[in-house]
Image (cartoon, coloured by chain):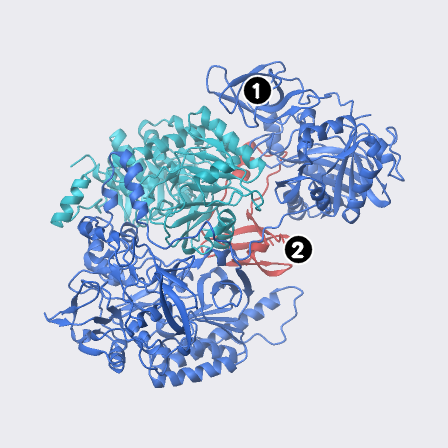
Amino acid sequence: MSRHGYRYSAGKLLRHGLTRGAWPRMWNRPERRDSYDVVIIGGGLHGLATAYYLAQNHGITNVAVVDKGYLGGGGSGRNTAIVRSNYLTPEGVAFYDRSLHLYNTMAADLNLNVMLSRRGHLTLAHTDSALRTMNWRAEVNKLLDIDSAVIGPAEVKRLTPSLDVSPNTRYPILGALYHPPGGIVRHDAVVWGYARAADHLGVHLLQETEVLDIICDGGDGPDGKGPGGRVTGVRTSRGDISSPVVVNCTAGWASLISNMAGVPLAITTHPLQAAVTEPCKVFLPTVVVSGSLHVYVSQTDRGELVFGASVDPVGTYRVNGTLEFTEELAGHVLELMPGISKMRLMRQWSGLCDMTPDYSPIMGHTPVEGYLVDVGWGTYGFKAGPVAGETMAETIATGRTAELIAAFTIDRFTDGDLVGEKGAAAVGH
Amino acid sequence: MSSNRLPIRGGELLDRSTNLSFTWNGRAYSGHEGDTIASALAAAGVEIFSRGMKYHRRRGILTANHWDPNLSVQVGDEPNVRAGSRRLVDGMQVSAQNVWPSLRWDLGAVNRLVGRYLSAGFYYKTFMRPQFLWHNLYQRVLRKFAPGGRVHWKTGTHGEYDKRYAHPDVLVAGGGPAGMAAALSAAEAGASVMLVEQEPELGGHLRWGGPDDLAVLADLNRAVHSTPGIEVLCDSIVTGRYDHNWVAVVQRNHEIAPERLIKARVGSLIVAPGLVERPYVFAGNDLPGVMLAGAVRRLINLWAVKPGNRAVVLSANSEGDAAVADLESAGVEVVAVLDARAGEDVVGARGRGRVTSVQTGDGRTLKADLLVTATGWTAPTSLLNMAGDRPVYDRIAARYFPQSLPDNVLVTGGIAGDGSTTELTAHGRETGSLAAQRALRLRHDRLTQTPRSATPDSALPAAIADNRIPLRRSPHPECYRSTTHGLVDYSEDVSSKDLIQATGEGFDSIELMKRYTTVTMGPGQGKLETVNAAAVLAEARAVEMADIGTTVWRPPFSPVSLGALAGRIFEPVRRSALQNWHETNGATNLLAGQWVRPDHYGDPMTEASNVRENVGIIDVTPLGKLDLRGPDVANLLDLVYVNRWQKLEVGRVRYGAMVAEDGVVSDDGVTGRLADSHYLMTTTSSGAAAVWEMLEDWLQTYRPDWEVHVTPVTGGLTSINVAGPRSRELLERLVENVDLSAGAFPYFSVRTGTVSGVQDCIIWRIGFTGELSYELHVPSGHALHVWESLLSNGSDLGVAPFGIEAQRILRLEKGHYIVGQDTDGLSKASTAGLGGLVKLDKADTIGLPELRAAFERTDLPVLVGLQPDDPMIVPDEACQIVEAGSNEILGRVTSSRMSPTLGRSVCLAQVDPSLASAGTAVTVQLVDGRRITATVQEHHAHVDPEGARQRV
Amino acid sequence: MIVVPCPNCGPRNSSDLRNAGELVSRPDPDTASLTEWRSYLYLRENPAGWVTETWYCRTGCRRYFTIERNTATNEIRDSENS
């Protein structure tokens, strides 16, 4: 047994193959306790990573992760699995670079192959103003030691031959921000990796347990909620659980959960849609993003093209998707790669994004003592998952806001100090 | 090549007078009109059509329809074509996919040797170390095994796809007997009906039925085609139902477009897709020669193909029984019929490349080359899922049924229950009437709700209750898995053993299991697999099927080509009335937002110099222009601009900057007062639409009491800037009724006059370039005349056109900032240097509290003029200003150019306030990593900071 | 593609309009505290249910109007504020 439980390896595959022996469970379905040191709401990547780092880095293991559905059923399993660190602001770069670092060693750290593919990430520029923004990002990135540069159309064509870089298209490709370490990961495996490791360290993963209320004491609002108060536990569909620390990791549902503690958020919930084609033999080697065309695309190892876009313009909690998303998506993809019109779109889906005014998260302590948030992840929560978990765990364990997230605290909306990612994040993938 | 073609069958679809030639893996074959690719090949004796995804086992016909997972083929440059439904076309080049070197000898089959190690999720459990090998070797190998056909991205073109909008009262998804009956009764009730059928002909399962079925079908066909108000779309699929009954149909039988996307706003949607037969899970269930009952019935009756010679039939229902009769009529020897209703079972099929024997539940081994299973149905509830329904499992009938549907979605036919053809059509008719009546009420409502639309000529149809007699649910044995293990998902090569393993590992909900094993994630999206997967999970967890739930079926119902979704690509550009002139006179274009405009006409530096020395003209039409009229315009301007407007006199113009409610600079421009209650506002080119909408918002929702009319005139007025020391001289030759002298027409003034015979031109004196200049706003119909007059009347003055690049050089020399380039998403008015402009003592202006707060802060960046100490170095825009000895970022160059006037580089930069005072030396890191020094200037303007040149 | 009822143009596809978000009331900018102002700027109810919101009839009559929409179902009903 390793520290993460049953150790996976090629040898184990051989042995199980020969003996046809059963594999052990990756995680358990434990009986809930009445009280925990920390209750994390949301069994997605952020919640599970926070739990894992609490246990692994700080020895805090009396932790429950509660989720109304199954593990990774929200944005963690619906995103397009892109990782990168070529952000615009120094605080953004430092944060996501740490995340990319954690992704790089994750397979070994968690003893689960998360299939990281550092295949290179291209953000196309179709206008000179977009090219200027790419230059800006590249220059900031270089100063912070991020592998990132602006390349011309010929180099774009060399890296990704299926792109049409001819100058007379409606949206000519004038260049691209090239980020070689960027790539894709098997998103579900990341969730399972953290779940398995956290479970083994003693964390309780309570699936199908819906939080109905956050129990507070001493606050300005009704029922002791709101600023000035403190959290004492949560009311769930399986009974009350007491805990001095409650962490909100619920992405698109963040406002609903936060209102239970009397802490309103600078968040609106919008669906982000994605789609996948039928598999075809692999021809697309990089991750390609076009901000102007609101599209990003990569090809999985199974041969499917995975597409994403920008969030739907109309806020809603509905995740059943729209036809117009697929229409616009197809039109824009064919602008970039006219030769693939006969590929077929096989499935579309959507997830809920918690959008903030400055395209940056809201993390750390709140005016209610013991109630912490890790929300506002918008469209970039997946790539931030590991570092968000690490810094939230540090913030919970030490009581002090981790340095990497100092720019992302909730006070910035009352202080007027918003983060400057907005300029670069129209399509942030 | 043996022939399995039977003598003529009563209901066959073939036109035997035709002969269509095609190739399969390079060999010549032929078939008839009416054949599918698969039926033509099967008739010619082909048994193997593909290889499994993981283990590359040989695969033959399983379902012989659109959902057959084994019949994905490449046709020319089109990958993943469903050979089970795609009709044969003369000249098709068909080949097998994902095999190497050939379908017959496929190297991928070596995977079978290691199959026992390739259990569910095996790849998650290995290749973790060393990472080097994962990135450089393992992953590349895995990618080689990706399934599917080849996309011809090098030679492919977008093609001629098309779209259509439709507004049927009733749309019927599925043209079987119930759907046809529903369409008929809906049309008879006065509804407009669209009847959509996936197959090339109507009839559903009646098509492969006996003489009675064919007679009913003929009657229905006659009625459907003779009843007015029914549009029949065959070879077309309803692929999605979205909110508010927005329904997507992909039409494949259009005469020109290969696929056409029809977007229909539907009053009532009737879902009548019938049922999808599901495979049975047992050892060897993917061997060629194992077929579903529906497959053999279709092969025999529709395409006159003999599916085998010696058959064993496992039957749990009437479809299986009918298959026995069909097989016998086709001369197939039926070795045994195993009745699942009586507990008989199949536990295995064996053979190399094709079934040769069948093991029965009671221990017999039967020699056979065909094993037919009829073990039950999957209700294809995709469209119902999309309408919010979560179908529930009925263990008596052994399938799922709809639970709760919105009023505008109804079901009929097999998805709703069982019955004889008469019962199904009766239910269809009742459903059609109900759907029509609901839709007609909706149509009536919509008409009455629409102001100014014609009032409906009839009264609101009365609401009627849903009194349909429900179809019964016939008992059916729960046949999912035999006592042995076999494939659950054919396209993903996932077996029941894999699913049980996954359950044991904790992936014990249907969604987690799906994600871990990839079951139901292939091209069929679970049409065949979902129910069996749920059954295996229920078995593994020892719970009831009903407690498992199913995965949610997402759109589309069947995959849709990107070409069809895109339709004709229609992304227009905006062109000024002068754009043709520019293009015939050597302009190099630039795309700027929606506009295409001249970047330059050859040499921007010369163009810029000519403006400084003589006179240049530039087409600035994309500049946003809003005509404002009414007594309250000044109040509106006071609200939306940071400065004051009440005292602007008629004939004067003023610069104004806007911020948003959060205090961030959002737009700027010049506004002139043309008459007492008449102003012209200009905005940035990219902000034109947003500013217009914003003005409307404030006027309509905040100050509806103000009387202001806003009319966008951006394209209606062509804007020409005439700039340079000789601009006045040039204009004096063309302007008739305006005194252009400095005294009569001073800087920042506006006049309306006649230019080159064109009346009502608005002329204002402003100076973006820093030179004496006049901006002409000319009615666009006469713009070319004015433009050409300027050129022909000024040749002795050196007049020449200049483009955007020259304008950028000139404005930068002059230090004019551009919103969005020199400012960003956080820039406040203080950063942009608007301290002198902003009036903080107004009672109301957009963003007022943030404006006040911004001017109290001392830590916000400052926009400054900057000059590199080496005058020949032009740092690229976006180069960072850093602390000399570290990588700490202290600002950035926002604009930079070589100045032809000064012969040196000039910049604007945002810097930390500590660096903002004139004379401060800063360090700029160039793109190549070199660091240079530069000096902060006193003014933004590098040329003529006093403004003497523009005020002459 | 949902249908949004414009009071002038009747029921229209939502692509003909622009959603301008949850209806919020603007404090008096001359007297509001920064905290009040920033609540107005940034904080949103964001309910999973009925919300009063503004739409702009972008390609039709150019009217701004409010409706109530259920963000959990996309049902739409008239607003008392319209």
Question: x, y percentage for residue B72?
Answer: 35, 61
The chain coloured cyan is: A
Of the 4 image quadrants, the one containing the N terminus of chain B is: bottom left
In this rendering, the count of numbered labels is: 2
User: What residue sits right under mark 1 in the picture?
Assistant: B913
Camera sees residue B839 = no
User: What residue sits right under mark 2 in the picture?
Assistant: C61
* SS type, badge 2: loop
Subunit of label 1: B
Question: x, y percentage for residue C8?
Answer: 65, 59
The chain coloured blue is: B
Residue at image x 68%, y 28%? B605
The front one of B871 and A21 is B871
The chain coloured red is: C
Q: Indicate the quadrant where residue B721 lies.
A: top right
Q: Indicate the quadrant where residue B409 lies.
A: bottom left
Horizontally, residue B316 falls left or right of residue A354, namely left
Horizontally, residue A19 falls left or right of residue B743, namely left
Horizontally, residue A208 falls left or right of residue B834, namely left
Subunit of label 2: C
Q: Indicate the quadrant where residue B585 lies.
A: top right
Q: Amino acid at mark 1?
A: Pro
Camera sees residue B750 = yes
Q: Residues within 10 Å of mark 2 (few under 14, many from 20)?
A: few
Q: Compared with residue A48, is residue B61 higher up or lower down, i.e. above or below?
A: below
Question: x, y percentage for residue B711?
Answer: 72, 48
Residue at image x 53%, y 35%? A423
Of the 4 image quadrants, the one containing the C terminus of chain B is: top right
